[in-house]
Amino acid sequence: MTAPLRIAILYGAESYQAYHLSDIAAVISRDPTVDLTILTVDPAIDAVLARLEAGVFARAIPHERLHAPLITRILRRARIFGLLKQQVLASPANLRRLAQFDAIVTSTTHLALVRDRVPRTTLFIHCDHGAGGRQESFSRSMAEFDLLIATGPAVVERFVADGLASSATAIAVGLVKLETCNRLATKHPKLFDNEAPIVVFNSHSKRRLRSWEKFADPLIEHAARTGEFNLIVAPHVKHFARRPRWVWRRWQKKAVPGRVHIDLGSEASIDMRYTLAADIYAGDVSSQVYEFLTEPKPCLFLNAHGAAWQGSPDYPMWRLGEVADTPEQAIALIRRAFDVHPRFAELQARERDARIGTRQTGMAAAAAEAILRFLRGAD
């Protein structure tokens, strides 16, 4: 009798990555020949997983929290250090646990940092949690994974072109998160009671890339004062995760009911409700633009750092709308976004299909099938 495949689904980062991986785990759970285990690092992920997993797993799957060394637990209390996920994964107890699996499926690249401390008989499989196209998504660490589950064909092409994978070890399946969020979608209350267009302002978490410091206050002030457009302020959940609550409260006080909605990190900021509700996208380099572009819609991009973006492979999304270098330009571009949108609609559709594929359903099943086929072929 053939031994079951021992597969770990590793949630090695914050809970937002669960949206890209949970439905894949659910499909794998339907295979009786797989011994499946869920491994987590972030204690806050439990509530998110309870929602994502409800009613879709074929059987009860054990969940384990990876061991956090004492010093890690102490430092986490300060918040400014984050989850210290690299230190958790490198703990000897966790390295021994990881070595017990035939494969580890994850959406965090931090697993690559322990590749030389886990036997090669344990295969590493990475599932994309975005499709932005920046160089960071194609770092040399990706070559440490045995299989790359990508969102779209353009992502696979770059993996292969950069020598990080072959056409057999990088596979495009579509944006699993889209399928997950569509499955979970409920009727959310309206955020605004007027007919003004809704703009979602989505800033990246990394300081060297994000538009927050330069654009957040001016956009909030303009929307609050004029009512010219409604504004959803929804930065990446990691942006404020390490900041003290008094900083949160300072920004939350800027919200204006009926005009400016500010969400600095609730689950609503990761379940696509804002990108689906908005009429116009204003952002920097976040791959959430492709979640917004499930249908072509007006976009503008915020160049807060004077990036030489034209012709750069790290800024593919900035071809999908006009680019503002100042807050005043951003407001002017919002005013004319609908008028200029026809210039970009066809390119948006092509770029969306290249980055996240054309599937609307079946993405998780395609990912699970690719993973199991690869593992059985690797026996």
Image (cartoon, rainbow, N blue to C red):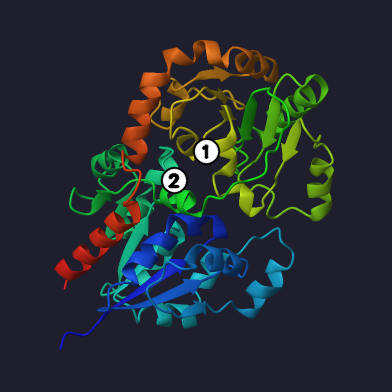
Q: Where is residue 156 shown, x and y percent of the image? A: 27, 43
Q: Work out which residue is located at the far front of the displayed protein and give it.
A: 187
Contact (Cβ within 8 Å) of mark 2 with mark 1:
yes
Left or right of residue 75: residue 62: left
Please name the residue shown 70% across and 46% down the image.
Answer: 264
Front-lying residue, 86 or 269: 269
Does 129 appear above or below 12? above
Rendered-image quadrant of the C terminus: bottom left
* Mark number displayed over residue 130: 2
Choose the circle earlier in sequence order: 2 or 1: 2
Q: Where is residue 72 shown, x and y percent of the image? A: 63, 72
Front-lying residue, 25 or 118: 25
Please name the residue shown 82% across and 36% down the image.
Answer: 254
Secondary-structure class at tag 1: loop
Quadrant in which residue 343 is drawn: top left
Does 324 appear above or below 182? above
* Mark number displayed over residue 286: 1
Please name the residue shown 61% across and 37% down the image.
Answer: 203
Secondary-structure class at tag 2: loop
Q: Is residue 129 visible?
A: no
Front-lying residue, 354 or 258: 258
Left or right of residue 160: residue 51: right
Does 138 appear above or below 16? above
Q: Where is residue 360 shown, x and y percent of the image? A: 35, 43
